[in-house]
Amino acid sequence: GESVGLHLPTLSVQEGDNSIINCAYSNSASDYFIWYKQESGKGPQFIIDIRSNMDKRQGQRVTVLLNKTVKHLSLQIAATQPGDSAVYFCAEINSGNTPLVFGKGTRLSVIA
Amino acid sequence: ETGVTQSPTHLIKTRGQQVTLRCSSQSGHNTVSWYQQALGQGPQFIFQYYREEENGRGNFPPRFSGLQFPNYSSELNVNALELDDSALYLCASSAGRFTEAFFGQGTRLTVV
């Protein structure tokens, strides 16, 4: 079946350090992945995406890595800041019935 | 700001009642998806509307229904509310069925 999950439910990092949030997916047919950030009381906010024909994509302070061999996705945040504290979700899109399948999320806490 | 607006922001209903939630999509987007997010969970796909037609549905009972209007705004209707329907309801708009989705702030529904 289709599922997207996360390895760690919580992650605490020191301000200024790099953060790595991991995600596993099971549907090898998925061809598009998105990372979302959700702050308390708000809707998910698009961070970065990657298509299955890519291994790596960089944005401003964020990098997404895709390993199709082991069906693993990661989000790297450089120089983590207090404003990065939120729940992060990975989501996959496949050509099946569900446009976006979300995992349960990882809560990132930044320690000042 | 994503340009996706939802109303109301908060709502309290009694078990057995009916509720209508509204969403205005981002300009230029013809696809609207609805998600239910229980506390501490990732968003769960309810259904999607593309050019006024339902175009995909998740594992939700028929008492969850929707509508999309010619201006691509959308409504989510839930009949015979149950306590477990208490959640954050998210609307996301996109330029197509399998492209990145931008979320609104959500409607917090509490059923008592």
Image (tube, rainbow, N blue to C red):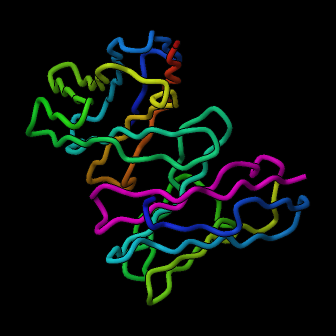
Q: Quadrant of residue B41?
A: top right
A64 vs B96: above or below: above
A53 vs A81: above or below: below
Q: Quadrant of residue B12?
A: bottom right
Q: Provide the residue span drawn in magenta.
A: B83-112
Q: Nearer the viewer, residue B40 or A41?
A: A41
Question: Is residue B87 shown left or right of residue B66?
Answer: right
Please name the residue shown 31% across and 55% down the image.
B100
Give x and y (percent) for residue B26: 41, 71
Q: Would you say residue B98 sits in the magenta stretch?
A: yes
Give x and y (percent) for residue A80: 38, 21
Q: Is residue A1 visible?
A: no
Q: Nearer the viewer, residue A111 or B80?
A: A111
Quadrant holding the N terminus of chain B: bottom left
Q: Would you say residue B24 sits in the magenta stretch?
A: no
**Figure label count:** 0
Residue at the bottom extreme, as displayed: B70
Give x and y (percent) for residue A72: 26, 23
B57 vs B73: above or below: above
Please name the residue shown 41% across and 65% down the image.
B93
Please name the residue shown 30% across and 26% down the image.
A75
Please name the residue shown 71% across and 67% down the image.
B8
Give x and y (percent) for residue B17: 86, 68
B111 vs B17: above or below: above
Q: Is residue B8 visible?
A: yes
